[in-house]
Image (tube, rainbow, N blue to C red):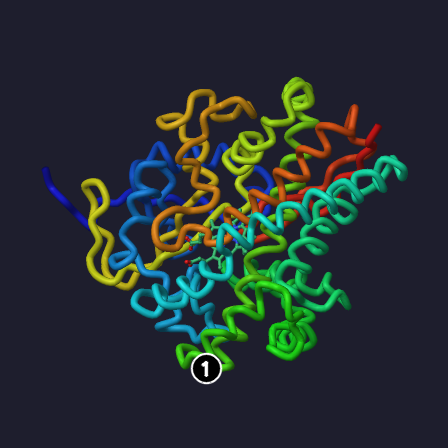
Amino acid sequence: MTISTSNIPTSSIDPFSEEYILEPYAFHEELRQLGPVSYLSDLGAFVVTQYEYVKEVLNQPLVFCSGAGVGISNFKKDPPWRVPSLVLETDPPDHTRNRAIISKALSPIALRALKTQFEAEANLLIDRLLEKRNFDAVKDLAEAFPLKVFGDAIGITPHEREKAIIYGNMVFNGMGPKNELLKQAMSRADEINPWIMSVCQRDNLSKSGLGIQIYDAVDSGILTEMEATTLVRSFLSAGIDTTAHAISNAIYSFVSFPEQWLKLKANPQLSKSAFEETLRFESPFQTFFRTTTSNAKLGNYVIPENEKVMLSLGSANRDPLQWENPDIFDISRITTGQLGFGTGIHGCVGQMLARAEVEALLQVMAKKVTSIRFTGEPKRLLHNTLRGFESLPIEFI
Ligand code: HEM
């Protein structure tokens, strides 16, 4: 069998076009048909869309690295606009050390205590929304919930928390090309950048939150003060709008598949598998990039060194070679192996916390809300990396 760099199929699909962002699934299918890897000629990057190969790339972090950025930009050629993340955009051994510090703060004991708070806040929020009846599920529910419970868990000031959503938008739109979406997302960068660094400083964090615990590593001489601030920033950039979009996507999916809502209502314990299925069906993180550190073999092809490789988690999660009826939202499906949280050494470090948040919310909704319906046209979010909604006008009864 010949292994070649030259015969990699080429496609002119632009994964950052409005058409693709709004409805990516037919494009995914076309790219999956091309094989394990193809070259996107307009973007100047390789793309991997089949489940098996997305997983293979994620599990080879030394060949497909994150340190040169997990967006289209190659930090070896283009300096990044912010101090890179010390976990997401870092390779071993630094990644190993920094991730262990974050993981320690997110211990199972800490999560158990938070779960009770998440349930209490979910009850309060859903009661308020049932009273209100008509509202925007994006602003009033999907964003409001993590801003409150996750913000409190990390221990940031309640003042102007919604700026964390704007920051997340900057970071994840920043993983795409320098297009209009990035320009819009960066329009308040001069105000948001200093704000995020300031709320993550030791003196501005609550004494009882998870964020302050990162500074223990400064006190024991492992991190500098600035590194600790940057690590706390990782919580906020990665943990709020991702969760918010997952909640919006769950609500959208339940309204679109009403029999699944009835299934959840009949058995609220299914909230766990409902969340996993939402991440598979409408993955909030559609894409991440890696950079090849050497000639990298994938299937019968070789991707040359120092090339950007786009991984489509959204496509892998709908690959018919992996999933039966992938375009059907089914909360009783066995979702083991879904890639909505990634996998391998960079697999989401906050996944247990995200699960605790969203499962608490879905469970309370299943118990208290009889029916959900759209009262207006849902408006999809135009975003370079994340899949979600800009607004979802709904009624709760
Ligand atoms: C539904 C919500 C969430 C989704 C869909 C999500 C998804 C992901 C994905 C796909 C990755 C892998 C990135 C890669 O391979 O390059 C990741 C990494 C990460 N996530 Fe999450 N995430 C969510 C919530 C959270 C929360 C709540 C936190 C914080 C507690 C968090 C913190 C992180 C961090 C720090 C990383 C980088 C890990 C590393 O590079 O080792 N995420 N997330």
* Three-letter code for the amino acid on which mark 1 is drawn: Thr
Can residue 74 be seen here?
Answer: no
* Residue 375 falls in image quadrant: top right
- Residue most toward the right? 131
| Above or below: residue 197 compared with residue 325 | below
The residue at 42%/73% (across/down) is: 78
The residue at 54%/30% (across/down) is: 273
Can residue 217 be seen here?
Answer: yes
Disc 1: which residue: 224
Residue 207 left/right relative to 217: right
Element on which disc 1 rests: loop
* Residue 365 falls in image quadrant: top right
Q: Exactly how many numbered labels are in the figure? A: 1
Beta carbon at label 1 within 8 Å of ligand 1:
no
| Above or below: residue 46 compared with residue 396 | below
The residue at 39%/37% (across/down) is: 31
Q: Residue 155: x and y, percent?
A: 65, 65
Q: Residue 54: x and y, percent?
A: 35, 43
Q: Residue 339: x and y, percent?
A: 43, 41
The residue at 47%/80% (across/down) is: 219
Which quarter shows the C terminus?
A: top right
- Residue most toward the left? 1
Q: Residue 114: x and y, percent?
A: 62, 51
Residue 279 left/right relative to 92: right
Q: Nearer the viewer, residue 35 or 155?
A: 155
Q: Nearer the viewer, residue 209 or 342?
A: 209
Which quarter shows the N terminus?
A: top left
* Residue 169 falls in image quadrant: bottom right
Q: Nearer the viewer, residue 350 or 46?
A: 350
Q: Categorize mark 1 by other alpha carbons within 10 Å: few (<14), some (14-19), many (20+).
A: some
